[in-house]
Image (spheres, coloured by chain):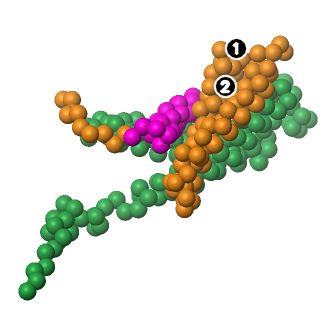
Chain colours: A orange, B green
Amino acid sequence: MPTKPAGTLYRGREGMWSWVGHRITGVVIFFFLLVHVLDTSLVRVSPEAYTAVIGAYKNPLMALGETGLVAAIVFHAFNGLRIIAVDFWKKGAKYQRQMLWTVLALWVVVMVGFSIRHLSLALGGH
Amino acid sequence: MTATIDSPRSGKNSPQYRRTGASRGNFEMLAWLFMRLSGVVLVVLIFGHLFVNLLVGEGIHAIDFGFVAGKWADPFWQIWDLAMLWLAMLHGTNGVRTIINDYAEKDSTRLWLKIVLYAATTVIIVLGTLVIFTFNPCPVVDGVPLPGGFCPA
């Protein structure tokens, strides 16, 4: 049965959207982690099995996927440190907005650097 | 004359509002604390993992069986990856548990989702731990040892 529409606690703006972003990136990273442990476990099956599966990952589509995954991880990491600051730093709640924009600025810097390096390695001839 | 009126929601008058007593103890507080402590450690472990595996040397092209074998021939990387496995899986499992509690409204749905979650977590942690510790970095395939500078001649 659908629940009755009620007032909402969702307030929008930086506080809510960073929370939404943290949830979504967290779930994405968790499901990747399950698969990542399984594929790495193939080293225990045979060298050929592992190298074959990893070889199948080495294509341009996966290179973009890896970049997206790292983007999710870097956001989750920096925003996680912001959450810790909000919880433990006396002025954390007061400056949570400024800290989110700092998180996003650092995220852009790190991702520009990572993308240039990773995509030139992954997409460049070898 | 003054009359004293008890707080209407004190435990004495309204047992349903009692905030102490038969509770789940400190579990939720400890889970909250664990997320913050493991989070800080995971930032270091995962950034190091990504840097060494993707950004150094030939990056992703270098990753094959020999690359993994070379790392796990060294106890330093065994411990690094073991800590990353356990902390990331427990951190992620607790995060997904929170999300299940938030969005699954039926008791039975929450129960089943959590059973599936905890089963998956257990399988992945046990599997990953066994792989790290039972792995042989110098296998002999068809009587021929695989090349590896870290293997005994």
Q: Left or right? Give the position of B69 relative to B15.
A: right
The x and y percentages for residue B102 are 35, 41
Q: How many marks?
A: 2
Which subunit holds the residue at mark 1? A
* Amino acid marked by disc 1: Pro
Q: CA distance from mark 2 to mark 1?
A: 11 Å
Disc 2 residue type?
Thr
**What segment carries the magenta color?**
A11-35
What residue did someone put label 2 on?
A67
Residue B151 painted magenta? no
The residue that disc 1 covers is: A60
Same chain for mark 2 and mark 1? The answer is yes
The image quarter containing residue B21 is bottom left
Residue B46 visible in the shown view: yes
N-terminal of the two: label 2 or label 1?
A: 1
Relative to B108, is A120 above or below?
above
Residue B82 appears at what percent x and percent y? 65, 45
Residue at 70% x, 14% y is: A59
Residue at (42% x, 37% y) in the render: A12
